Amino acid sequence: MFDTRFIGFEPGTNNLELAGASILVDLKDFDGVQLAVDSLAADLHKVTGSKSAIFNDVASLNWEDSSNVLSRDIMIVVGSLEKSQFIRELVDTGNLCVQSIQGKWESFQTNVLACPWPSTKHMLVISGSDKRGTIFGIYTLAEQIGVSPWYWWADVPISPHKHIYALPIQTAQGEPSVQYRGIFINDETPGLIDWAHEKFGPKLNSEFYKTVFELLLRMKANFIWPAMWSGFPEPGSIFFEDDPLNQELAHRYGIVVSTSHHEPMQRNMSEWRMSNKGKWVWEENKERIVDFMRAGAERAHPYESILTLGMRGESDGAIQSQDPRAILTDVVATQRDIINDIYGRPDGVGQVMALYKEVQKHYEEGLEVPDDVTLLFADDNFGNIRRLPTSKERHRQGGAGIYYHLEYVLLALFYEKVAKTDKAKIQQQLLAAHASDARKIWLFNVGDIKPLELPLTFALSLAWNIHTPCPVRLFDFFDAYAEREFGLKYAKDIAKLLMSHDRMMSYRRHEHIESNTFSILQYREAESVMAKWRILEERAEEVMRSLPTSHKAAYFQIVQHPIRASRINTELRVTLGRNQLYGLQRRNTTNVLAYRILRLFDDDWSLTEEYNHSPWVDDKWNHIMKQPHYGFSPTTWQAPSRDMITGLSFVQRQQASNFICGQMGIAVEGHTGVRPGLVNEESDRMQPSRGELVSGLTLPELCPYGPKNRFFEIYTRGPKDVDWFAVVEQDWVLLSQYSGHLSPDGEEDQRVEVSIDWNKAPKKFHGIVIINIRSQQADFEQVHVKVICRQVPEGFSGFVESNGSISIDVGMSFSESQQLYQAYPYLGRTSSGAIGLALSSKLPGIDLQPLLYPIYLFSGPSTFRVILYFTMTLEYQPEEQLRYDILLGDSKQTARLLEYHLIADLPVGWEDAVRNNVWTRTHSFCAVSPGAHVIGYRPLARGLLLERIIVDAGGLKDSYFGPPASSFIGNLD
């Protein structure tokens, strides 16, 4: 998307018409080039309506037939430096200079030249340094005339253009940032498998893989671990046997085939299981396993391949042995012997060692891997790279790469159907990998492929050009993507939707959201999240209504479905939390929410069915979204067979509430109530509540620097109507309403917002205001409002305490003048992003100027806590511990972010952090006096990315995000 543009749609003085242009390609060029040229001719026809004939020699272009409708003004010449006689002739005659791509890996250039042959006047020449360089040049032309790489997979519309033009740019070039770039089709059942079986037959055959290979090449990818799900339908997916043409076809197209981290030497594990050769245990069955591996290497010999070394245990588990490292040492040595026998040298074919899970531990403990073998470091399955090359490993002949998950299936941590890793996180991790010279192989686990159009496009775009876009211009990607898929007219609106959805995906993967994830009680957290999803969905529906029918299928799949699915999933969980709270409080609306949850559950299924049976493309994608995503068990990795929800609360609507507490209920913001739903045997303490019950009816404080409003809710808890009215003596205490009617069958309770007119409120007032609430049915309750009128001293600039806490989104006050630091404005859970050291900077240590955050405290807490929120990460550089300084006045604490019990293990607290997408670290300081203070933060490693600083001065409440950003007084500079 970010390659130099050499195609336009408007006529110009020197623009050259391409509609109907002939294509010249050497018949002796690579098969993959011929296949791509065939696709290009079809693409030109789709866009312009004019056919482009393919020719294989110059002489045939010297036609005299004036009835020939082909354009004689320009032709397209395509070829590789290695095999195209036409490109060689242009170079030899001095018409074409290819020095900039000569000898490079998969690079291409385009040139508009005068034609030296008498056939036409001008040429658009696409020359590639090698086979795939040429193919990528061809598909870049196809993309620039308006054919998206996803046009078939995502039903992206192709906009007709009767005229397309080659722009008079002398040279446009493209070359990759990473050598091998591709996908792992994994966890493909039931979605992809059932879909493919319906569309292509009982196996993942060559017709299926044609669509995959072309998609990869159009995205400038070149590498695959094929589908390998075992046992459904029996025997499972076996790339090499499901269709004898699969492996040959990959080679023809130009796709390099390898096999997954636990399938060594080009063999699928389903092949072993069906071979009846005994146990997959090296110590017991070495001879048969060696024969099995040898057969895979022999089968791969004619084709471009990268062989996976090592092995894991049965069913992708760890090797069961007293000394697994010794076994792996013997396995690798034996595999090298096999390769030497078949390829003539132990390094005679590309090889990779996947350091996945416990294999990384064996490597760290001394497992020797031959220098020419690529080390494939893995993430933690959730987009957090576990390890990158050390300074010594960067010099390995085989280099290093990464295996990175865009989806995953395991335990209750599963995410596949809806949840996606946000693009800023993907970018930050891939930038770190590239900066550490892990540039040999980038492999992305994509599950069913189809639901991952956007993240896969982004990841492979960075693999091709790591610097586009840069982190501070991430929106440029969404803008370019939306324009490519939907056209300029709709690009900005769609890009904003995609960006907003992506930012909200950083909150938490949907499959990890529970009923208590977002606080129902504190900081209006859950309702704030839901409000954002509803607004986003409304905007998405508005755009859908404005689109022509030709765009609706792609828009639904790429934009509307993810947004609506996100809203439904989140609303179901949040509503379940409210339902459970309301049940405790015995609200009539408990049942309303229970039935709303069931409707949401059905809405989720209806949305899936709309995908499977589309009003625009019929059953084209039937089954593809059928993966269940509710009802995972925390005790097993197996997926649920169908969706299930639990935990609904109901109250008996026909039953009257105990007369001691009455039919009218009051709930205040931030509190469940004291013993909610239970009757106090001392009835004189209720109506109104007194004594220890008062805390459950006291609103969080109102002050000039906190939220403008606090609220309480009035609800019914019986079969009778409630007519209520509220009285407050102070005229500067304002209510959003002072009376109301509640029906026992009502759908909603009534919320009353409480605010203060600070111009009328007594100066320095610090006390409790009482709101009396009565009903005509003789109910009586009181709400207690804590009001504090206070001001910071004149001249102070900084963040101000409210309700016993301060919350600072660090990106909000970041200045680009702060050298050595890098802003990631779209990374993390806050709207202002995260801050870290620039990847290009050397570690400055204590000489680095800390980031400073002035604060003002009204309270003087005996224990003062500073809580830091870091973007989820792992300590991927063994030479660089993730350490930082936190400063308060003259006090300094230096800390290491992560604690590891064992080498190559996941750190303590990983399971919670990976769900939350952040690490939180708390630092306690001695008593701090009221007044102005400064918090300082200094990172001592490049992988640390800080999002928030929260100060707990005694009033911090439990919640997912923490308090909303605090008021800032003065000048941010």
Image (cartoon, helix red, strand yellow):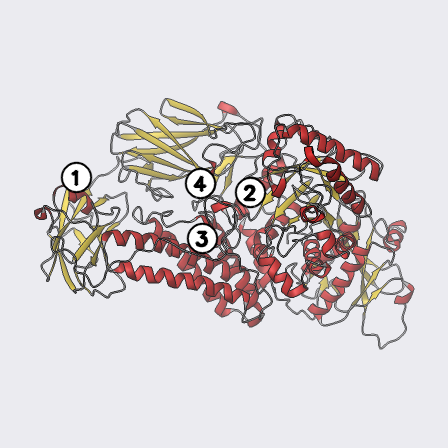
- SS class of the residue under badge 3? loop
Q: CA distance from mark 1 to mark 2?
A: 55 Å
Q: What's the mark number on residue 811?
A: 4
The image shows residue 386 at horizontal and vertical percentages of: 57, 35
- SS class of the residue under badge 4? helix
Q: Earlier in the sequence, mark 1 or mark 3?
A: 3
Can I make out residue 48 in this image?
A: yes
Q: CA distance from mark 2 to mark 4?
A: 28 Å
- SS class of the residue under badge 2? loop
Q: Amino acid at mark 3?
A: Gly
Q: Amino acid at mark 4?
A: Gly
Q: Which label lies toward us, 1 or 3?
A: 3
Q: Which label lies toward us, 3 or 4?
A: 3
Q: Which label lies toward us, 1 or 2?
A: 2
Label 2: how many Cα within 10 Å (few below 14, some 14–19, many 20+): many
- Is residue 557 found left or right of 229 in the rendered image? left
**Residues under numbered marks 3 and 4 in contact, where contact means CB atoms less than 8 Å apart:** no
Q: Which residue matches tag 2?
A: 381
Q: CA distance from mark 1 to mark 4?
A: 34 Å
Q: Which residue matches tag 3?
A: 631
Q: Which residue matches tag 1?
A: 764
Label 1: how many Cα within 10 Å (few below 14, some 14–19, many 20+): few
**Residues under numbered marks 1 and 3 in contact, where contact means CB atoms less than 8 Å apart:** no
Q: CA distance from mark 3 to mark 2?
A: 20 Å
Q: Amino acid at mark 2?
A: Asn
Q: Which label lies toward us, 2 or 4?
A: 2
- Is residue 876 found left or right of 162 in the rendered image? left
